[in-house]
Image (tube, grey):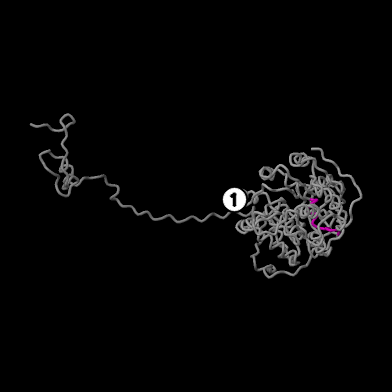
Amino acid sequence: MNTTTTPDPQLPELFSDLQLDSRILQAVRDMGYEKLTPIQAKAIPLLLDGRDIMGAAQTGTGKTAAFSLPILQQLLPLASTSVSPARHPVRALMLAPTRELADQVYVNLKAYAKHTPLRCACVFGGMDMAPQTAELRKGVELLVATPGRLLDHVEAKTVNLSQVRFVVLDEADRMLDIGFLPDLQRILSYLPKERTTLLFSATFSPEIKRLAQSYLQNPLLVEVARPNATATNVEQRVYRVDEDDKRAALEQLLRDNDLPQVIVFVNSRLGAGRLARALERDGVKAAAMHGDKSQAERLATLDAFKRGEIQALVATDVAARGLDIAELPGVVNYDVPFNAEDYVHRIGRTGRAGASGLAITLATARDARGLADIEKLIKRQFEPQTLELRRSSRPRREFESPRREFDTPRREPVSPRRDAEAPLAPRPTRPARSARHDPWFDKPYEADPNASPIWDHSTGSTDAGAAAPGTAGAGRARRKVATLLGGQGKG
């Protein structure tokens, strides 16, 4: 694959300058968009010509519209108002690595297509398959899905991908990761060979570009900024703190910077739950969002955060991609991410659509290597600041009653020298028990001369028919033993 960098002709500036249907332009105006972002101005004309594209742009620059609008434009001649599912086959497939990103793409796509007869649907895991199956059987032209749930529907034969003309891999660097590559290869095997494939992401490593060689045909590489660059309208700060002071530093930064809402990123699910509970105890409205929660819980938490009911959304990297929170003032990296690319996506949740944002990172002594990897990726040097913590005198809660002197008895100190010089007191001895001796147990065994031995009745002569009553052999016939074996023969 020989990627070609696009030339830079006279680029359009407004959506009205594009050759788009009036119904699509009306939907764009309804959403309040007029000017094109750089990635949209470069990618949309090329996609209208049917070219395969690898698009690299910063997060929050409108990549969803960059691939959605030209796909809608090219599918409009095939749109149908018929109620028959056969007239609405899947013609465009958009794959996303996370459920939140899939839902976000679906919301935008549905808004762009609301004035057209094209149908949209979204399927992802963590939800019941029955409603998704019912919607797919009605027929949809544009399908947004996560790889795992799409394969479930393919195996259940509830979706047919034989007429797909457009394939979009959103956040392609994660889609082509080791964990998604087998599922992605299976999905592409169900698609026609003649199709248009689009890859969009904020980060493209050389390994990802090599993996994309088998998926794209003579693609154009569209880059509107330096690869792996962060948004210039996001202020990035790094504070050096001790591990034990991270939570106090977080609460102080939230107060000092007047952040009404913030996403706090951590590296583990367990850490997200613990931090959210600790912030709640300290009076901060917080909620956790991670992979262990069901999809219904994650969507409910996200909706509450968008409504402003939650101040701090403590999340793992499931929230680092695809979440579009309008005018989010800032994000906090409570933990430095393991992968440097995740830092770019994390801070991309703020400063979207040209707004300003603040990205704060709390770094401990053991995070030096992680910070160095991030600096190497984004080609920027951080200047860590020292945060002076103010010990807050917050009101004591009811269960934190002050300790009183009589709660625990005081123990008088003992002088070691006095204890060593003092003679050891003898340990009290227990009185010996009085032994009662019975001389009967010392006598030897003596047989009773009046007792009749039992064996006289059980081993008598063979002429007796049975043993005497009350003996061991009573009621049983004697066995006759041959002479050869020691028995008595006939006389």
186 sits to left or right of 41: left
Q: Residue at x 11, y 41 (%)?
A: 464
Mark 1, secondary structure of its residue: loop
Q: Quadrant of residue 249?
A: bottom right
**Which amino acid, mark 1?**
Ala
Q: Is residue 22 magenta?
A: no
In the rendered image, the vertical position of residue 46 relative to residue 255, given as above or below: above
Part of the protein shown in magenta: 343-354
Specify whether residue 309 is in view.
yes
In the rendered image, the vertical position of residue 180 relative to residue 243, given as above or below: above
Q: Quadrant of the C terminus?
A: top left
Q: Residue furthest left?
A: 491
Q: Quadrant of residue 176?
A: top right
Residue 434: x percent and y percent? Answer: 39, 55
Residue 253: x percent and y percent? Answer: 81, 61
Q: Which residue is mark 1?
A: 156
Q: Quadrant of the N terminus?
A: top right
Residue 409: x percent and y percent? Answer: 64, 65
| Dominant SS type (magenta) | helix
Q: Residue furthest top?
A: 484
Residue 424: x percent and y percent? Answer: 58, 53
Q: Quadrant of residue 216?
A: top right
